[in-house]
Amino acid sequence: MSISSYEHIHPDFRHIMGLPDKARIEFMDQPRWINYKAAQQIMDTLQGLMHKPQRPRMPNLLVVGDSNNGKTTIIRRFRELCGQGYVNEDSEPVKPVILAEAPPSADEKGLLISILERFFTPYRASDPVSKLRYQVIHLLRMCHTRVLIIDEFHSLLTGSPIKQREVMNALKLLCNELAIPIVGVGTREAVRVLHTDPQHASRFDVMALPLWELNEDFQRLLAGFETILPLKMPSRLYQPELAAQLYTISEGNIGNLHRLLVECATETIKTGKEQIDKTVIESKAWLRPTRGIRELVA
């Protein structure tokens, strides 16, 4: 079968079909973007924030959702499309989007160091918080940063209420001083971080990334996934019976669904079946999470 005949695979990936089985399996473990409505809504909102004119009280955003449901993938895609660094016409470095990770617990110094790490700049962790804060403000201003994103925002719940307020006040200071939006990304528990002070809650809009429902949107998602699975035969994953099976095992979580489909596709490549069907999906029922834990079968 010629490579051009694999019409069920996206044209950009049909060349993969000419590679050995091992290479096709490895291809599926590489990160790859699949667009869908909820992700595009978040992307559009982030782009809107990025282009907001500067004003004393900039709008902020908190993106929340279940663990492993695609939040970090979306913000990394946003950074990839809109946040690539460059040198402007005045020979100044520009980093439009800074994506940092919240420290393991509420700690202002830990947060500042996490931001400094994104600039690959020298700093001394032993310096006082005031000096590190000045260094962060200077770098964000010098690099014309338009959006600061803090991933794993729910980690700020770990720590005393005083520490939580200190971190949130630090973020408020950065927002006020630089007049840029701040975006938090985390689990649904992250909303509780905003309750440390009514002022913080009033500054953040909350946008949820829900679990999938078994509907036409889920079937369209499956059709999109199928275009990047390097199988020689079409599986038609969007058909109602297969879609219902995949939904039941994945529980509507896109990370679980991706893992399930990769496991199924890997098996069909190894066995030479080259097609995901009901039997293959049933054999992977052990991938269904039980209270967040998957126990590998021997």
Image (spheres, rainbow, N blue to C red):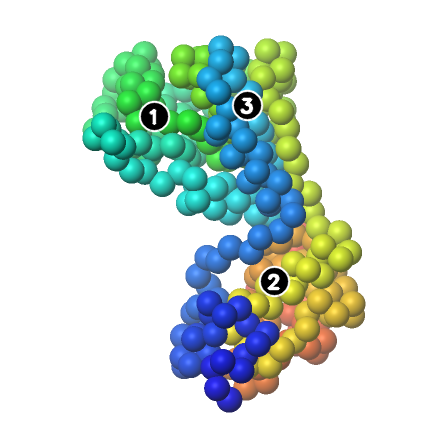
Q: Residue at x 44, y 74 (%)?
A: 16
Q: Are marks 1 and 2 in contact (CB under 8 Å)?
A: no
Helix, strand or loop at mark 2 = helix
Q: Are marks 2 and 3 in contact (CB under 8 Å)?
A: no
- Residue underneath mark 3: 60
Q: Residue at x 40, y 38 (%)?
A: 83
For the residues labelled 1 and 2, the Cα–Cα distance comes to 36 Å
The outermost residue toward the front is: 89
- Residue underneath mark 1: 144
Q: Are marks 3 and 1 in contact (CB under 8 Å)?
A: no
Is residue 177 shown above or below 107?
Answer: above
Q: Amino acid at mark 1?
A: His
Residue 262 in the image: x percent, y percent?
A: 55, 67
Residue 57 in the image: x percent, y percent?
A: 52, 13
Q: Residue at x 75, y 70 (%)?
A: 239
Q: Point out the image quarter for the C terminus.
A: bottom right
On the rendered structure, is 237 left or right of 147? right
The numbered dot on residue 6 is none
For the residues labelled 2 and 3, the Cα–Cα distance comes to 32 Å
Q: Mark 1 packing: few (<14 Cα in 10 Å), some, or many (20+)?
A: some
Q: Amino acid at mark 2?
A: Gly
Can I make out residue 110 in this image?
A: no
Q: Mark 3 packing: few (<14 Cα in 10 Å), some, or many (20+)?
A: many
Q: Amino acid at mark 3?
A: Asn
On the rendered structure, is 258 left or right of 132? right
Helix, strand or loop at mark 3 = strand
- Residue underneath mark 2: 224
Is residue 14 shown above or below 123?
Answer: below
Of the image marks 3 and 1, the number of the one nearer the N terminus = 3
Can I make out residue 282 in this image?
A: yes
Q: Nearer the viewer, mark 3 or mark 1?
A: 1
